[in-house]
Image (cartoon, rainbow, N blue to C red):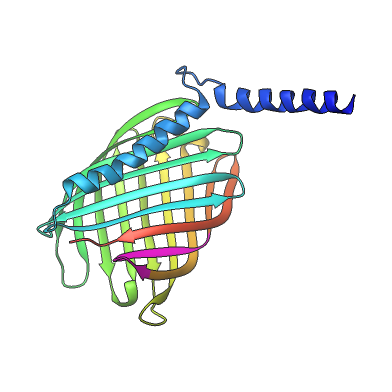
Amino acid sequence: MASFARRGLNREMGNRRSAVFSRRNRFGQTRLGSWCTALAWCASVWTAQATLTPASVAAFDYGEVLVGHNQVYTDLNLFLFIQDVVVTQMRAVSTVDYDGNASSSGHAGLGYRALGSVIDIGVNVLAGYETNEQGVRPWVRGSLFAFYLGPDGFLIWIEPSVGKDDIGVGGAIMYQPKINERWGVFTSLGYGFSRSSVVFGDDGWTLSQQLRLGATTEWGNVSWIFGAGANLEETYDGVTSNVGAFIRISGLPG
């Protein structure tokens, strides 16, 4: 009797898990399908790097996975600096929670970089998309960026942007002091703010922060970074958080 009850319970739990991943959004796409789409988009960033980056082109790229208490977060980022002045960038981000809800965003851009004695500035034209269970929203923005790269991997990046439907600003502050020839400390704060002009009320803004603290080491001409991380997002209806462990692979080919 107990064995029969256990089989019935296992069957019921299996049906629930299947329902979570087979539930469809407004576009008829299952949650599992949405997650696979997001990961496929992220993988295309690495494909682009492999096919579009000759040895003479400087690049900054990283891939990161954060396994948190609420969701799994994936971020792939690629910047190419052609002859030091032409800038192309691609980024893909995906999240999936433990109920199977998936969302993703990505963009590609082309811009010009003016080299300065202390701070580099430039302009970008960006095209991208955001998707979740409510649908897909494409966007196009123009941006002005400025960054400073100092000793010990100290980096400040700021990039305000303006589009047809929204305005925003994003950036990062990073510091990577060396402990010895092989190991170092990694600290990073990413930030972003956006406000929609389509929904220009109280629910039209989003504020986000990404905190990272860990260690970095070099192996195989690639930086391996790991530690603790937190993603925070504030909107009109509250705060969401995702705290856990992350690993990041970063390279500087060229």
Residue span colored magenta: 218-228
Residue 154 picture quarter: bottom left
Instruction: Name the side, left or right, on which 83 lies relative to 12.
Output: left
Whole-percent x and y of residue 210?
A: 47, 55
Residue occupying image coordinates x 34% and y 60%: 250
Quadrant in which the C terminus is drawn:
bottom left
Count of marks overlaid on the render: 0
Q: Residue furthest right?
A: 1
Residue 47 picture quarter: top left
Mainly helix, strand or loop, the magenta region? strand
Residue 109 forms part of the magenta stretch: no
Query: Could you tell me if residue 196 is visible in this image?
Result: no
Residue 174 picture quarter: bottom left
Whole-percent x and y of residue 101?
A: 55, 32
Residue closer to the observer: 18 or 134: 18
Judge whether 82 appears above or below 108 on screen.
below
Residue occupying image coordinates x 48% and y 46%: 73
Residue occupying image coordinates x 61% and y 26%: 20
Residue occupying image coordinates x 14% and y 64%: 115
Query: Could you tell me if residue 207 is visible in this image?
Result: yes
Judge whether 179 appears above or below 58 on screen.
below
Judge whether 87 appears above or below 107 on screen.
below
Residue closer to the observer: 4 or 114: 4
Residue closer to the observer: 51 or 166: 51
Whole-percent x and y of residue 211?
A: 49, 60
Residue closer to the observer: 186 or 175: 186
Quadrant in which the N terminus is drawn:
top right
Instruction: Name the side, left or right, on which 6 lies relative to 130.
Output: right
Whole-percent x and y of residue 238?
A: 60, 43
